[in-house]
Image: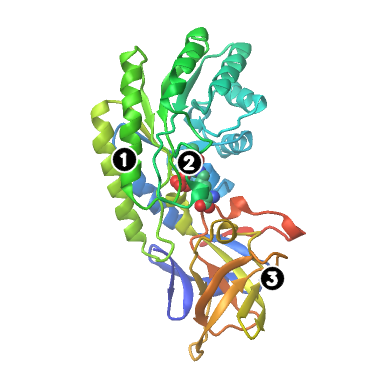
Amino acid sequence: MGFYWSDNELKCKQDHKVYSVAEIVEGLTDPIYLYDLVGLRHRMSVYKDQVGKKGHVHYAVKANDHPRILKEFVDAGFGVDVVSGGEFSKCLAAGFSPADIVFSGVGKTSEEITLAISEGVGQINIECPQELERVAFVASHLGKKVSVAFRMNPDVDAETHPYIKTGFRENKFGMDRSFLPELERILAANSRHLELRGLTIHIGSQIRSVKPMVEAVEKTLIDFEVLRRRGFNLLSFDVGGGIGIDYESEDLEADETFIQEYLKKIREVLDPVGCEVVFEPGRSLVARFGVLLGEVQYIKKTPFKTFAILNTGMHHLMRPALYEAHHRIVPVKARPEGSAELYDVVGPICESADVLGRERMLPSLSQGDWLGIMDAGAYGAVMVSDYNSHRRPEAVFVGD
Ligand code: LLP
């Protein structure tokens, strides 16, 4: 299943059919994002089959918001997690019911909150008391009652890159329990327009160990039980997203084993609580099923390095420049007789940070060869920038 490299070629296997990526890029002159919807459907079913009766999966749209991909999630009966009015509107356009949308995000504007409440959003995740007041104000103005959840900051170390840790006390996200009295006061003053449905956390992304996730749930459960004892009818515990993948390997089964282990552990902790459990995965659903494909424009040898300069780079996939993230890079088609060489695979942007892969041993490359930057289905196309005014890569779907 999925994208894989064999017999010197990048291929995509969908059920019993094998596609050659070289045939897909033939004749193209611009980079593309290539997606495998069949692999994605299979990955969705891994989540669906394991969440249990009281579990709901709300796909974190920020990972990839392409309409075609959103449609797959609508068809498979997923909810969504959005973080802006823009994402909210894209989800409505894709066919999601507003009731299946959870609205997260740390800086929602009045305009965004108005859009969400007037459309009938399922739940708004609250990040600070002022936001709760704003939501109450908008809801009363519209004459509506809205379900909210408090995003807690459990102060755990998610063991991931510092830029994508979100559940540590020094992060801007969530609230510790000292906020609860003020939040309760705002709830009480606005009981006709606000309903506290539950608590939510999200401690970071690309997390490769279940331990900090369970620790965060257990810490937050203390507040959950306290609020229940104080008379709040909490119905839902939203554990956020965060499950990582192994970017060094193409082992899809290892991802699935980790997802299953994670869901099992979270269910062990939360099933006895008797509430609905919401999961908000992004990366672990879509990352594997997208590849960024670019063409070698020049091979440049200096006394220090050999550069493969592509027509794609940090403007199309920002993760290596921003987080020094590793993505496997493979030739779309290698010459069987060629030898291997060490390359820095770089883009056309006028920044030395524009490196997609440093010191990669690759089969000998020439001008006109295509390379695949793997596992780029999450936080790839959504983070494309217009810097240097290059065209954005088109999305192409295997087997279309
Ligand atoms: N829920 C909330 C509230 C989030 O902030 C996020 C991601 C997710 C769910 C989904 O997390 P996931 O399952 O994808 O880890 N651009 C970075 C990742 C930023 C993630 C931000 N929040 C990267 O490329 O690694």
> To which residue does mark 1 refer?
214
**Quarter containing the C terminus:** bottom right
Is disc 2 placed on a helix, strand or loop? loop
Is disc 1 placed on a helix, strand or loop? helix
* Distance (Cα) linking label 1 and label 2: 15 Å
Q: Position of residue 59 (x, y in %)?
A: 46, 41
> To which residue does mark 2 refer?
166
> To which residue does mark 3 refer?
29
**Quarter containing the N terminus:** bottom left
Q: Is 198 placed left or right of 340 in the picture?
A: left
Q: Is 25 placed left or right of 176 in the picture?
A: right
Residue 282 visible in the current orientation: no
Identified by mark 2, the residue type is Thr
Identified by mark 1, the residue type is Val
* Distance (Cα) linking label 3 and label 1: 47 Å
**Residue 167 found in image quarter:** top left
Mark 1 residue CB less than 8 A from any atom of ligand 1: no
Classify mark 1: residues with Cα within 10 Å, few (<14), some (14-19) or many (20+): some
Mark 2 residue CB less than 8 A from any atom of ligand 1: yes
Q: Which mark is in front, 3 or 1?
A: 1
Classify mark 2: residues with Cα within 10 Å, few (<14), some (14-19) or many (20+): many
Q: Which residue occupies 63% across, 23% down?
A: 114
Q: Position of residue 268 (x, y in %)?
A: 24, 37
Q: Which residue occupies 53% across, 49% down?
A: 163
Query: Pointers 3 and 1 in contact (CB under 8 A)?
Result: no
**Residue 23 found in image quarter:** bottom right
Q: Earlier in the sequence, mark 1 or mark 2?
A: 2
Q: Earlier in the sequence, mark 3 or mark 1?
A: 3
Q: Which residue occupies 45% across, 39% down?
A: 168
Query: How many tags in the picture?
Result: 3
